[in-house]
Amino acid sequence: MIPFNQHALTYTCPYCGLPQAFQGSYNFKNTCYDAHAIVAHDYETRFRIYTIRCTNNKCQRICVIGINERDGHQVDIMPQHVFRRFPEYIPQPIRADYEEACQIITLSPKAAATLLRRCLQGMIRDFYGIRKNRLIDEIAELQGRIPPFQWDAIDSLRKLGNIGAHMERDVNLIIDIDIEEAAGLLQLVEMLFQQWYINRHDQEELCARITAAADSKETQRQAGSRNA
């Protein structure tokens, strides 16, 4: 759901991730909210439709949000699917698989799980440099290099992703994945993005700043000694 506060008139752009004040327009639309409820209670619900343009000059894309004036329920009209924007130092093909999984998770949780499985394999190969013919072998080599609970969850993601990636021997056997299960896999991938890529990047930046500060002071000290 697009982060939007109609009272404070603030929102976070779902395209570029920039938090900002609302700049746009809105109008009212009377619409039938629930056909069954109308038959029983004979009422209509009024929506306030917000059309918002991002203030980021590099983005400036538009999103449209509907707010049910009766109960405050928010409906994302455009875009209908929101996902986290991760830094570009995470390889683009990995981010692309994650973003596509977000877009289809409500339509096909099984297909989303398959994409997240591929996303996981890409992370293992890129971050740890492990390359095998099969994902199960890559995950086996990963064991002992990450916390056991994390390894168990990663192997479970592989198993659930296999449901969509491989046909059962009995073609009449159908094993499905529900939205909650797929959402859990999505959260696992987001956690790995944070713990593997973002945490490492932040640590490298911090250490580089400290090293640069120490080198600068050492240069000043040596220059002061020569001039003494």
Image: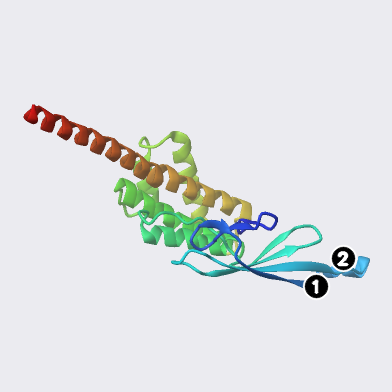
**Is 25 drawn above or below residue 166 in the view shown?**
below
Q: Residues within 10 Å of mark 1 (few under 14, many from 20)?
A: few
Marks 2 and 1, the one that precedes in the sequence: 1
Task: Identify the coloring.
Answer: rainbow
- Picture residue at 35% right of the left edge, 39% below the top: 203
Image position, residue 103 (x, y; %): 55, 64
Front-most of residues 180 and 54: 54
Residue 26 image-quadrant placement:
bottom right
Front-most of residues 47 and 124: 47
From the image, tell me which residue sits under label 1: 30
- Of tags 2 and 1, the one toward the viewer is 1
Question: In the picture provided, is 17 more to the left or to the right than 65?
Answer: left
- Picture residue at 30% right of the left edge, 48% below the top: 130
Q: Check disc 1 and report its element: helix, strand or loop.
A: strand
- Picture residue at 35% right of the left edge, 37% below the top: 145
Q: Residues within 10 Å of mark 2 (few under 14, many from 20)?
A: few
| Residue 190 seen in the current view | yes
**Viewport quadrant of the C terminus:** top left
From the image, tell me which residue sits under label 2: 37
Three-letter residue code for mark 2: Ala
Image position, residue 18 (x, y; %): 51, 57
Q: Check disc 2 and report its element: helix, strand or loop.
A: helix
Image position, residue 51 (x, y; %): 63, 70
> Can you name the residue that lies furthest to the front here?
228
| Residue 168 seen in the current view | no
Three-letter residue code for mark 1: Asn
Residue 179 image-quadrant placement:
bottom right
Q: CA distance from mark 2 to mark 1?
A: 15 Å
> Can you name the residue that lies furthest to the right here?
41
**Viewport quadrant of the N terminus:** bottom right
